[in-house]
Amino acid sequence: MCSRRLSMILGLVLMWSVQAFGQAENETIIGCLTARGDRPGFYSIKEEGTGATFLATGLDDLAHYTAGQKVRLTGKAVREGGEDLFRVSKIEQLATTCEPAALPKSMKEAVGRSTFGVRGGVGFDPAIIYMGAHASLGPIVSNLWFRPSYEFGFGEVTKINSLNLDGVYFIPVAARDRTTQQVEFWNIYLGAGLGVHLKRRGFEEEEVDIDFGDWDFSTGLNMIFGIQKRSGIFAELRAGAYGSPSIKLIVGFNFK
């Protein structure tokens, strides 16, 4: 009974987080801006961290930042004339060069750019409800991010605490969501990592607590396929081996 109440509370918190923050009015893209010689007033920006390329327009000042500077564009994705555009309302210069930093400096910068999020989902073998939190640090190298997470899972019989030390790689492509009138982009990523798990089996009845044994410790391999919306919402299918839970479906939100 206590587990069911806790799952409802945590589920409501997760849903509120997604609804409250998932519909941001403006989006940001960080990357390198280049002019389109065939189309005056239009520019290409290759997003840092995912490698996806977007067509940008909207400000005359964009022309001043096409000499190899790293910039942050603020604006909104729109569909005009049968094509997807990022209409820019604000531009900020972040660095005078787009050259990647050396690895130690790159890792330090990744820590400084770290973001956090919430997650939840279901496991199928064993049948468990998961809730937790994670951090995203990166990009460390190219489109590679470090995404550690903690998840607490509970079912009728099993309780499990999981620490996941995962790396995810964003494939440099963005898919457009055609189900709504608003233009939304999804990024695709793959990942793998180490899972550390502490599990206990037992169940509770009214005034009776039946325990099947001590806590069991195990480690295993995590494999991940995921999609992430630019607003921060994501969903991922996780498969485990060598001690990790076999199949999990996780959804969550990255705060920016």
Image: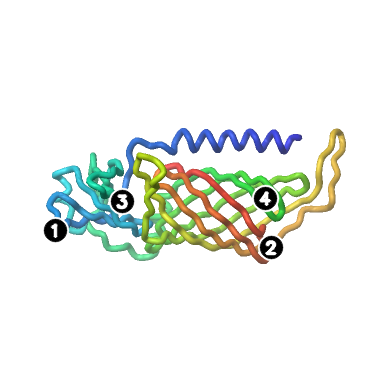
Please identify, in this view, whether the residue under mark 4 or under mark 1 is nearer the observer: 1
User: Dot 3, crowdedness within 10 Å: few (<14), some or many (≥20)?
Assistant: some
- Residue 33 image point, x, y percent: 22, 55
SS type, badge 4: strand
SS type, badge 1: loop
Tell me which label, 2 or 3, sits earlier in the chain: 3
Tell me which label, 4 or 1, sits earlier in the chain: 1
User: Dot 2, crowdedness within 10 Å: few (<14), some or many (≥20)?
Assistant: some
Mark 3 touches mark 4? (CB < 8 Å):
no
Mark 3, residue position: 30
Q: Is residue 80 left or right of residue 119?
A: left
Q: How far apart, in angstroms, are the residues tagged by discs 3 and 4?
A: 35 Å
Mark 1, residue position: 38
What amino acid does circle 3 point to?
A: Ile
Q: Residue at x 17, y 48 (%)?
A: 62
Q: How far apart, in angstroms, are the residues tagged by discs 4 and 1?
A: 55 Å
Mark 2, residue position: 243
SS type, badge 2: loop
In the rendered image, the vertical position of residue 76 relative to residue 235, given as above or below = above
- Residue 38 image point, x, y percent: 14, 58
